[in-house]
Image (cartoon, rainbow, N blue to C red):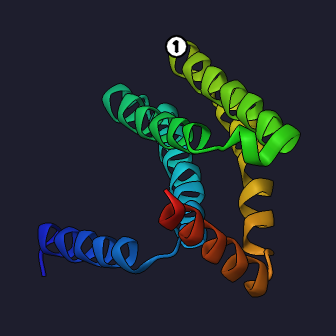
Amino acid sequence: MSLKGINAYKKGNLKQDVANADPHKLTLMLLQGALDRIAYAKGAMERRELKEKATFISKATAIIIHLRDTLDVKVGGEVAENMFALYEFMIEKLNEAHVNNDVALLDEVSSLLAPIRDAWVQIPQEAKEEAFRAQRESKQAI
């Protein structure tokens, strides 16, 4: 099977995973996707593949912007405000890493993002289901 065929298969599976995922799973996929793109950017940076580095940093930044923009500060209060500021910091560091070809800044962002992903994995199933129900109910009320 060619690489093109494998990539098409993986892309199809990703679309199916997204279509079937609850909000918790989608957030987890985004967090992991950002971490993966940062790792790819680091490799590209080390190999001096500037175009690939730019692509991966851009994708990681877009994911973190999406995570930041989906925070509900009214509901999440201080925690959401702190997460917003942390995501802003990560975005700035990714941009700085890109401009300065600084692997250490990519590592710094990964070291901030990985514990968030790890904590997200630890959320109990009951809490996920309760949050999903509350989200559906709030959408129905609108």
At label 1, the amino acid type is Val
Vertically, is 36 above or below 64?
below
User: On screen, 67 above or below 127?
Assistant: above
Occupied quadrant, residue 6: bottom left
Q: Position of residue 130 (x, y in %)?
A: 72, 78
Residue 131 against residue 51 in the figure, above or below? below
Give the quadrant of residue 11.
Answer: bottom left
Q: Position of residue 35 (x, y in %)?
A: 59, 51
Tell me the element at label 1.
Answer: helix
Where does residue 117 sit, x and y in percent of width and height? 71, 60
Left/right of residue 106 with respect to residue 10 in the rendered view: right
Q: Residue at x 87, y 38 (%)?
A: 78
At x 54% / y 49%, what residue is drawn?
A: 34
Which residue has dot 1 on it?
99
Asked whether 40 or 27 is in front, the reply is 27
Can residue 33 be seen here? The reply is: yes
Residue at horizontal 49 percent and vertical 43 percent from the top:
63
Q: Nearer the viewer, residue 3 or 122?
A: 122
